[in-house]
Image (cartoon, rainbow, N blue to C red):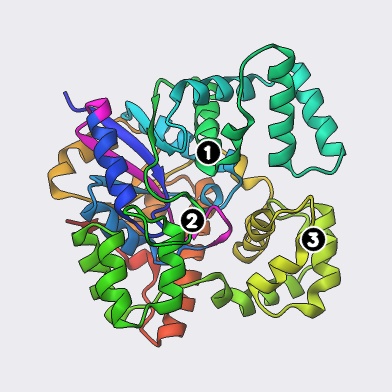
């Protein structure tokens, strides 16, 4: 009997640490199918992915994935809570996922499950402490960390605050929280991260981070050194060869490539209308409106808007939601579809099982979405189409290449 392990990912871009996670996920769970739910053309930190979703899908399949689906953009670009909740909802709806595997700095699944269940239950004392810290002006991550620490201390439960200082531990807790809140039968499993930390920008490690690869790519992508040395050390051989060939004719995108489009969208809005977008607070909306005359680039403006309460990533997400027209109520809705981005030929039999068992339509041909989805769900799929076509437009303009509508892009098959 086949077992499937699900992995929620961005692969921005794919590297050796991701290959290791897929290998370990299969080995530790006994699964023979790795199903990836991957962000599309925009990612959770509020920026464009450095490569387009179909290109990153090809890298994932070359690196060990068996089937890759697209995480809808309104989940993919949301806060850690919405990102994890939306992704877990999609996996639950597929009715064929046995395990959910995620990387963490700690490698401690029991702690992730315990804290996830606690946050799903939200005890009264914890909520009171959280409100208190938020009133003191702390950002939500800082307030939650302090509230958890105080709650657990008063309950005499041993806990290290350092556990909440690392991004993958935090996301792992959110996955476990979503599994608990949705009464999911999917079993969580964590793989201890190896090599560089999430924010590490050095490529000296045997397993460099995606952040380090992006930084080096932006700094030196058109040099022979990057193509011959950097990728060799950072990516599996097949993925490295694919990306080197890709870079001969393609380009990558960063947030500042969207600066003019973002400013145009911001200029159309008032502080009141900005508040309709996801992750946008009245305070941030007012700051945007009052500082708009100083807008130069996406990154410069985000940096300028930062305060003690408003983190850089939170602002990035809010600005991206304006750019992609994602309203505040959208990330909280239930999934209505999932789109197939690619698969290996030998996994086609399991893909048929997924199509049979799934509670939501699996879209294999994007152009058929109106036939497959109820009318009320069309606009949700069209959000993803718009996001990808916007990405494609900017990429084609940057490289002077021909535009291909997202409706015309078939799944990658290897």
- Secondary structure, mark 3, is helix
Q: Which residue is mark 1?
A: 171
Query: Looking at the image, which residue is at 48% across and 56% down?
Result: 200
Total count of labels: 3
Task: Identify the image quadrant of residue 23.
Answer: top left
Judged by depth in the image, the label closer to the viewer, 3 or 2, is 2
Judged by depth in the image, the label closer to the viewer, 1 or 2, is 2
Q: Quick check: 182 above or below 402?
A: above
Visible residue check, residue 64? yes
Does residue 234 appear left or right of residue 382 in this picture? left
Q: Is residue 200 magenta?
A: no
Q: Quadrant of the N terminus?
A: top left
Query: Looking at the image, which residue is at 39% across and 71% down?
Result: 405
Q: Are marks 3 and 1 in contact (CB under 8 Å)?
A: no
Query: Mark 2: few, some, or many residues within 10 Å (few <14, many ≥20)?
Result: some
Judged by depth in the image, the label closer to the viewer, 3 or 1, is 1
Visible residue check, residue 41? no
Task: Identify the image quadrant of residue 392.
Answer: bottom left
Q: Which residues are magenta?
A: 28-47
- Secondary structure, mark 2, is loop
Foreground residue among 228 and 271: 228
Q: CA distance from mark 3 to mark 2?
A: 38 Å
Does residue 328 appear left or right of residue 50 in this picture? right
User: From this viewpoint, which residue is outermost toward the bottom?
Assistant: 400
Q: Which residue is mark 3?
A: 273
Q: Which residue is mark 2?
A: 200
Residue 136 coordinates in the image, percent (x, y): 87, 39
Counting residues from the N terminus, which is met first, the one under dot 3 or under dot 1? 1
Residue 154 coordinates in the image, percent (x, y): 74, 14
């Amino acid at each position: 009997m086949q077992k499937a392990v699900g992995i929620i990912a961005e692969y921005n871009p794919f590297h050796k640490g991701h290959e290791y996670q897929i290998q370990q996920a299969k080995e530790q769970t006994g699964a023979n199918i790795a199903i990836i739910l991957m962000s599309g053309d925009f990612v959770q930190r509020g920026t464009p992915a450095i490569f387009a979703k179909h290109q990153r899908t090809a890298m994932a399949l070359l690196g060990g994935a068996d089937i890759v689906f697209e995480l809808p953009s309104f989940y993919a670009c949301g806060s850690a809570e919405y990102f994890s909740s939306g992704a877990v909802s999609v996996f639950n709806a597929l009715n064929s996922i046995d395990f959910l595997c995620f990387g963490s700095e700690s490698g401690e699944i029991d702690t992730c499950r315990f804290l996830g269940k606690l946050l799903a239950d939200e005890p009264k004392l914890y909520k009171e402490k959280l409100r208190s810290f938020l009133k003191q002006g702390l950002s939500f991550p800082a307030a939650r960390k302090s509230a958890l620490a105080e709650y657990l201390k008063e309950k005499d439960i041993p806990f290290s605050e350092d556990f909440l200082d690392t991004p993958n531990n935090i996301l792992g807790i959110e996955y476990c929280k979503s599994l608990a809140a949705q009464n999911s039968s999917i079993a969580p499993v964590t793989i201890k991260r190896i090599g560089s930390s999430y924010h590490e920008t050095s490529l000296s490690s045997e397993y460099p981070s995606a952040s380090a690869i992006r930084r080096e790519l932006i700094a030196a992508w058109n040099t022979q050194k990057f193509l011959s040395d950097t990728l060799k050390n950072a990516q599996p051989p097949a993925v490295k060869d694919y990306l080197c060939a890709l870079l001969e004719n393609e380009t990558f995108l960063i947030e500042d490539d969207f600066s003019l489009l973002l400013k145009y969208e911001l200029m159309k809005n008032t502080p009141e209308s900005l508040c309709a977008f996801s992750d946008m607070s009245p305070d941030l909306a007012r700051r945007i409106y009052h500082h708009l005359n100083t807008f130069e680039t996406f990154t410069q403006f985000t940096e300028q808007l930062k305060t003690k309460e408003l983190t850089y990533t939170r602002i990035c997400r809010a600005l991206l939601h304006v750019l992609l027209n994602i309203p505040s109520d959208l990330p909280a809705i239930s999934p209505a579809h999932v789109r197939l981005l690619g698969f290996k030929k030998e996994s086609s039999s399991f893909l048929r099982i997924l199509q049979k068992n799934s509670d939501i339509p699996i879209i294999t041909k994007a152009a058929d979405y109106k036939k497959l989805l109820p009318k009320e769900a069309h606009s949700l799929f069209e959000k993803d189409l718009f996001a990808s076509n916007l990405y494609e437009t900017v990429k084609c303009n940057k490289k002077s290449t021909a535009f291909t509508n997202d409706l015309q892009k078939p799944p990658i098959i290897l």
